[in-house]
Image (cartoon, rainbow, N blue to C red):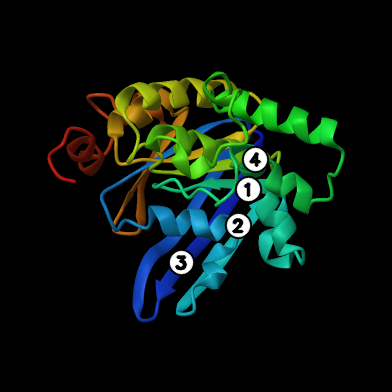
Amino acid sequence: MVDYKIKIEDVSVAYGKTTVLHNVSLQIPRNGIFAVIGPANSGKTTLLKCLNRTIELEKNASVKGQISIDGENTKRIRDVHGLRRRIGMVFPLPVGLPFTIYDNVAYAPRMAGVRKKSVLNEIVERCLRQAALWDEVKDRLNSLGTMLSGGQQQRLTIARALSHDPEILCLDEFSIAVDPVTTMRIEDVLVELKKKMTIILVTNLVQQARRLGDLTCFLNMGEVVQVDDTEKVFSEDPGSQVTYDYVHGVFG
């Protein structure tokens, strides 16, 4: 029996009069990589925002349906900040805090009440190692994070997301501003991280989904076209002509 971490039931989202997600229902297993692919404006980023309720920060957004994490309806969770700590988010372009490399990673633990220097040191090193960045920055932790290269800043963003010790890690087009070599390094990191957390990978790079996804969801025009084993989605007979056309570059 599959152990589901997240259940999304009949979720629809509209920005004003424009509906961007139409009755989306998904079940996302625990501890694996759930890839989400689809053309631009298919609602992929909006779906991620629904998970940690940052969609509520959009003034003209309305949401219907239900999302449950470990069986708990997220709408009933009063501690929204606590919910967001459980769900790490990495966005397409690295957004570094105007702090040192060390303080970028230590910020969230400090906000959570961690004060002991030795504990903070352990968290910073662990997260930077998990993000495949430690060896490159261990001798300059007091340098500004914004002085790192684009690929390094993206890995610093991942390290900062991991500092929350999240149960779920959401990555939205993390490789847009990252060179191919760094992208492959981050992909190796994700393969290790999935052993201990649920990863949702939104990507326009279908081959990245093929390499990493245990399951792949194809969204098109705000609707779920197909959810299946990644091997099936990328096969010569995925069971959906629209899926076949998209993954083979006929459109998108």
Please tell me whether mark 1 sits on a helix, a strand or a loop. strand
**Amino acid type shown at disc 4:** Val
Amino acid beneath label 1: Ile
Tell which circle, 1 or 4, labels the residue nearer the N-terminal end: 1
x%, y% of residue 65? 55, 66
What quarter of the picture does the N terminus occupy? Answer: top right
In this rendering, which labeled residue sits more in front, label 3 or label 2?
2
| C-alpha span from label 3 to label 2 | 15 Å
List the residue tagged with mark 3.
12
Q: Residue at x 84, y 30 (%)?
A: 118
The local crowd at label 1, few if under 14, some if 14 to 19, many if 20 or more residues have their Cα within 10 Å, is many
> Position of 4 compared to 76: left or right?
left
- Residue located 57% across and 20% down the image: 192
Q: Which residue is mark 1?
A: 87
The answer for how far apart the CA atoms under marks 1 and 4 are is 16 Å
Q: Which residue is mark 4?
A: 105
Q: Is residue 178 above or below residue 80?
A: above
Q: CA distance from mark 1 to mark 3?
A: 21 Å
In primary-sequence order, the first of circles 3 and 2 is 3
At label 2, counting other C-alpha atoms closer than 10 Å, the crowd grade (few under 14, some 14-19, many 20 or more) is many
Residue drawn at x 83%, y 44% is: 114
In the picture of the structure, the residue carrying the numbered disc 2 is: 52
Q: Identify the amino acid type marked 2.
A: Asn
Asked whether residue 70 appears in the rendered view, the answer is no
The one of 52 and 13 positioned closer to us in this rendering:
52
Check whether the beta carbons of the residues at disc 1 and disc 2 lie within 8 A of each other. yes
